Amino acid sequence: MTTALPDPYTNAEMYADVPTKRLIAWGVDFLVIAAITAVLVPITLFTALFYIPFLWLMVSFLYRWVTLSGDGATWGMRFASIEIREGNGQRLDMMSAFFHTLGYHVSIAIFPLQLVSIALMLMSERKQGLTDHILGTVALNRSARMG
């Protein structure tokens, strides 16, 4: 497979600490999604309390999809200085961001898949999770940004 992504051996700084940064980004994103959901509950006159898991899921999906397709990073990823790139080195477009978000939510919903994803992030050359392996995407450090 031909790729425009940095080589993990000659450009190790692009992948340094990415699993830890992804965990930090996940925590920040969790707080952002919680805040957005909390703001929406009173707007629904508190009826959202009856379907809060569904509301959370919708907010999470839309938040991740929109932010990934805009700048290749959620707000948490920006905070942690990482971004998601496609195999050709480009930022995610709307469709790629949609499928990356869908893959993330499927792996969260099916717990063993999340464990596989975490193991792959810790052990693979490019620190890719399960969705990244399937789509050919990768999380890279923004501070050592590719063009």
Image (cartoon, rainbow, N blue to C red):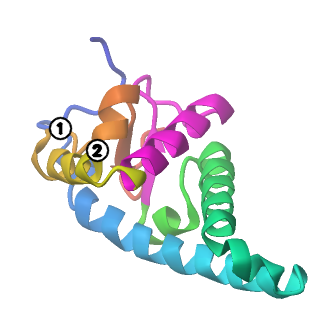
Residue 130: percent from the left, percent from the top? 29, 39
Is 135 covered by the magenta stretch? no
Question: Badge 2, how many Cα within 10 Å: few under 14, some, many 20+?
Answer: many
Image side of residue 48 versus residue 23, left or right: right
| Above or below, 64 relative to 4 | below
Quadrant including the N terminus: top left
- At x 60%, y 80%, the residue is 34
Q: Nearer the viewer, residue 49 or 7?
A: 49
Query: Dot 1: what SS?
Result: loop
Mark 1, residue position: 8
Amino acid type of the residue tagged 2 in the rendering: Gly
| Above or below, 68 relative to 26 | above
- At x 30%, y 12%, the residue is 2
| Above or below, 112 relative to 27 | above
Residue 29: percent from the left, percent from the top? 52, 71
Q: Quadrant of residue 142?
A: bottom left
Q: Earlier in the sequence, mark 2 or mark 1?
A: 1
Give the magenta range. 82-108
Image side of residue 2 versus residue 101, left or right: left
Amino acid type of the residue tagged 1 in the rendering: Pro
Residue 96: percent from the left, percent from the top? 56, 31
Q: Nearer the viewer, residue 24 or 56?
A: 56
- At x 28%, y 33%, the residue is 6
Find the distance from the CA under tag 2 to the CA under tag 1. 15 Å
Mark 2, residue position: 129
Is 83 covered by the magenta stretch? yes
